[in-house]
Image: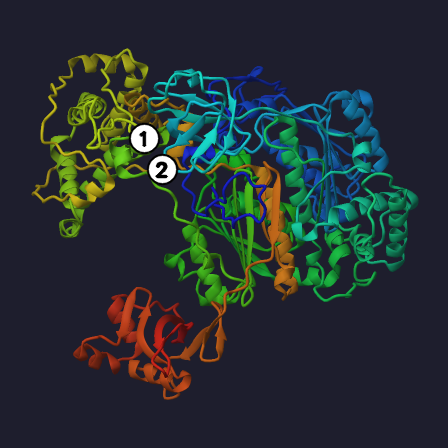
Amino acid sequence: DRCIRVRSSPTPCMSSSPLSKKRRLSGTETKTGSHCSSSNSVRTDLSHTPANGMAKNGNDAEIDEGLYSRQLYVLGHDAMKRMQNSNVLISGMRGLGVEIAKNVILGGVRSVTVHDQGVAEWRDLSSQFYLREEDLGKNRAEVSQPRLAELNNYVPVTAYTGALNEDYLTKFQVVVLTNSTLDEQQQVGELCHGKGIKLIIADTRGLFGQLFCDFGEEMIVYDTNGEQPLSAMISMITKDKQGVVTCLDEARHGFESGDYVTFTEIQGMTELNGCQPVEIKVLGPYTFSICDTAGFTDYVRGGIVSQVKMPKKISFKSLSSSMAEPEFLMTDFAKFDRPGQLHVGFQAIHAFQKKHNNLPAPWCQTDGDELLTLAKEVNSAQTGSAKVEQLDEALMKKLSYVAAGDLAPVNAFIGGLAAQEVMKACTGKFMPIMQWLYFDALECLAEEEGVTLTKEECAPRNCRYDGQIAVFGTKLQDMLAKQRYFLVGAGAIGCELLKNFAMIGLASGEGEVIVTDMDTIEKSNLNRQFLFRPSDVTKMKSDTAAAAVKQMNPSIRITGHQNRVGPDTERIYDDDFFESLDGVANALDNVDARMYMDRRCVYYRKPLLESGTLGTKGNVQVVIPFLTESYSSSQDPPEKSIPICTLKNFPNAIEHTLQWARDEFEGLFKQPPENAMQYLTDPKFMERTLKLPGAQPMEVLEAVYKSLITDCPHSWADCVAWARNHWQCQYSNNIRQLLHNFPPDQLTSSGAPFWSGPKRCPHPLEFSTSNELHMDYIMAAANLFAQTYSLPCSTDRAAVVKILQEVKVPVFTPRSGVKIHVSDQELQNSNSSVGKIHKSVYVCNKIFKIHPDDDTNFHMDFIVAASNLRAENYDIPPTDRHKSKLIAGKIIPAIATTTAAVVGLVCLELIKIVQGHKKLESYKNGFMNLALPFFAFSEPIAAPRHKYYEIDWSLWDRFEVTGLQASGEEMTLRQFLDYFKNEHKLEITMLSQGVSMLYSFFMPAAKLKERLELPMTEIVTKVSKKKLGKHVKALVFELCCNDLSDEDVEVPYVRYTIR
């Protein structure tokens, strides 16, 4: 559901190329790691049978693809099965513990036990979203258990309030400790390390976070990065001690030295086909060396090289030895020495707590001094590499000042990471954190050096925000309560944002959160959009999410809308609406809507919080008026599309046949009925169609003629006959025609074989009613065709076989003189003429759009069958329904862990915005890939500066022109041009509004003479042929100008106020 944008990583450790923000999801980018089909079942014990029928009875539970589909595309079936065999214990049900539990339960482990011996206090409510005011004094685990259990009916959740002894801990495969003492960590750590139980320790102290992993002395990682295995076509292999493989120069191979590969379809050097994985050494973008090939047969041609994911063994040190000799994972390269300092600092906090039985008081100078003394003692007692040369005293004091704090955004970030580590521990999928991670967000504190809050400002108030007041004082709390924010989208990111908004107290006073989303809830949303329950399916997202967060914090003022944002809703989201906002948060799933909201925020000069995820990758971008560039300031490279001729005649990968099948679906069941309906109902349809370029008019009208006359069915049997004939045409006749034009032994003008390299030689198929795949196609195509004409449908295969025996399939003979285009260039150069068509009485009344998540509507049945039949034509290995859905449905893989972590970072930026931070270096854009794991933070890019004369400007600047003059008359075009000449010494050469050209220096004299005396708004309505709505207070004009020396100058846009 989302989209992601990443700037190039500043370090070489990212194995994958930067993502693009509008990403075509071909399977090459997002194939799951496993190759098992969706029908493989997995054992888990389900102690209960959910009332909503989501789980199967008995012990054989299949993976519920309807629920887990987006996550399956991240983890794969094998990893999901391993996860479904893991029992997880999460100790500590404060804000961090509940966040980890929420993400792990959504993920789908075998069972989760939540443990806590403490009771709910006021300070817990600042981030524990499943505690309410009436729960104060009750055990945190017992109160949280029923609310957590609702998240996923497949995962039994139990509460435990006893001691964590050896007998109890051995029931679990993974143990997570939060809110625990150092003694407890060391005791449990030794036990887990000895028993082979995987251990994660997570902790947050105000603006600081800590994470530790120990997955035992021998852990196998099956997939270190989660990327799709690469493959490339081969053009040459040498015979040598280290044979050199050269790939076709269509695209770089993308391999790295140390990768393992195997080979298929090589002609000549067949010893390599199906060989055991071979390690390679990269020599260049198209070449690499392999094993000794000197004794092999000579290479002739062809072949595909494919990367093989090799299991990797990794070893972890126990907690005690890792504390003395720590290995750190960097989260922020600008804070290179921070992890070592915080490693000592967190131990000092434990020492303070042990001594006083409480944490240092918020912003208390004496406690700060004492913590510093303790940190020095801890440091001098270190014997290993944990000892730091010079303690950062200011950092230790800040740690002391905020340690009692409990912040929802920091818990969301660390909790998202910790939950992903639980999944790694269960599955061996992705690289674990080795072994310590420290994080801080000190930029959230006041920007001015030396500003400290007072103990009184930050003392507990016995209110739900105490954990946050401990860090920021009461002033920020009052500011947050008054904020008016617009949240665009209530999907996965939207739900997480709303949870954080409720916890931090955004709009809990006079403010308001307006959330808009036009979508309804679907079953596949429940796996990560955690505010929704199975009973909410088909309800509106925005209303359901708003009601759910009101349960978490009854004082949040929130309104749900069901509007799409865009030019159509500018009457609702008008000047008054935007001017009343303090900021906007995007939770969108497409680039166009992101760009639109970005333009609105630049125009109204409002801060924008932008984020996105794709599987384990996530990003955060903050846009601050007059300070940073905007979202649209940088463009990604255009996405790679498949050439038309590859799709039409020369596919060589399953992605090509799936795209062909998707186009086939739209060309049979979407486009023709749409065009036929327009032909029958829209008088201007013919006029519009005839203006289309090239051969399009002919194609459209022929399709309409077929829909209404030649192909129009009258019965179910007609639909079956149509499907059978269409099958014959696509999988037999067209292939025979192609082979007639280009026989298998055809040579090119240079004497090379025509069918070689990326061109695979096809073969026609013979239809058989006993072939399952052939019948799948007929059933799906006939049913879709019948639905188009509102004819009765059928799923009775035996009856369809009988009908097929009666169908007469015309004999086909390949024709000479049929032109088949070999390249897209050839295709563009061809053209054609248009015929005539008459109306018919039959009306097509069903138009389809692909819905990949509905398994009952024949959409995916048709696409899977059509793609796999074409794959069989070209000897391309077929693929299952699960992968077909990903590629043809253009589904974006998603997982709750990444979303939670990304949104935590977004809300830290929100806290800076509300405080009014002014320095660029205070803000952080972030990128993460939890699979590697990798993190990169950078300050946002400053808004680029431009100049005309001596005036400096950026995208946030504009000319303000008031259209109504003192006389009450509106400015004419002549007055507008004169105004710029006199006031700004600029001669306007061209003037436009949107896509309408209002004035240009080369305009015909008569037209110009007429226009110069007209008021500006009259020219706009005349040229655009649209009336100005009453909600429009101002117009935006774009200018091209010359300065006094007649040079072209770049200038800002004009905001022309009319009301």
Q: Position of residue 901 (x, y in %)?
A: 61, 44
Q: Are marks 1 and 2 in contact (CB under 8 Å)?
A: yes
- Circle 2: element type: loop
Q: Position of residue 746 (x, y in %)?
A: 20, 25
Total marks shown come to 2
Q: As displayed, is residue 954 above or below residue 20?
A: below
Q: As displayed, is residue 867 above or below residue 206?
A: above
Q: Quickly name the residue at label 1.
A: 758
Residue 653 horizontal side relative to residue 767, left or right:
right
Q: Position of residue 962 (x, y in %)?
A: 41, 80
Q: Nearer the viewer, residue 1054 or 258?
A: 258
Q: Quickly name the residue at label 2.
A: 250
The part of the image, by quadrant, that contains residue 90 is top right
Q: Nearer the viewer, residue 54 or 949?
A: 949
Residue at the extreme bottom of the image, as rendered: 967
On-image quarter of the C terminus: bottom left
Residue at the image position 59 percent from the left and 46 percent from the top: 11
